Amino acid sequence: MEAQYKLSGQLPLKEHFRVEAVVLREVFTNAGRAAGVIALMVTSLFVKGDALTWVITTIALLQLMIGRLASEDFPKRRSAVRGRSKSGFG
């Protein structure tokens, strides 16, 4: 992330571009959250009984997995598990 801010400092708008980038990131983050809430609301209309509990539990577990998939370690661990080098050949 730091490299992106350094790179944005070299662009013509400099600090203003940084502000715009942060604003856009927040807009898309909030749009994703809103889409998730809307999807849950629509799902709850069609699901009856205890199934909604399983839907919420599944969503919570997926959120835990996202953190691991987004970590910088994940590609290294994945290639180590497969027994391959970092490039994927060998």
Image (spheres, rainbow, N blue to C red):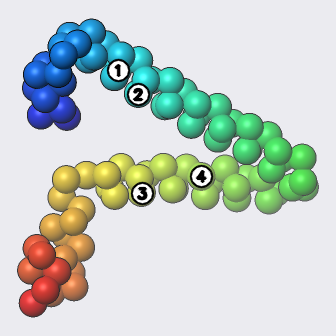
Q: Quadrant of the C terminus?
A: bottom left
In the image, residue 75 sits, relative to residue 43, either above or below, namely below
Q: Which of the two discs, 1 and 4, sits closer to the camera?
A: 1
Asked which secondary structure carries label 2, the reply is helix
Q: Which residue is mark 2?
A: 25
Asked which secondary structure carries label 4, the reply is helix
Q: Which of the two discs, 2 and 4, sits closer to the camera?
A: 2
Kindly tell me whether residue 35 is visible in this rendering: yes
Kindly tell me whether residue 49 is visible in this rendering: no
Q: Which residue is mark 3?
A: 65
State the separation of the CA atoms marked 1 and 4: 27 Å
Residue drawn at (18%, 58%), measured in percent from left and top? 73
Q: Which residue is mark 1?
A: 22
State the separation of the CA atoms marked 2 and 4: 22 Å
Asked which secondary structure carries label 3, the reply is helix
Residue farthest to the front?
12
Q: Which residue is mark 4?
A: 59
Residue drawn at (17%, 21%), measured in percent from left and top? 11
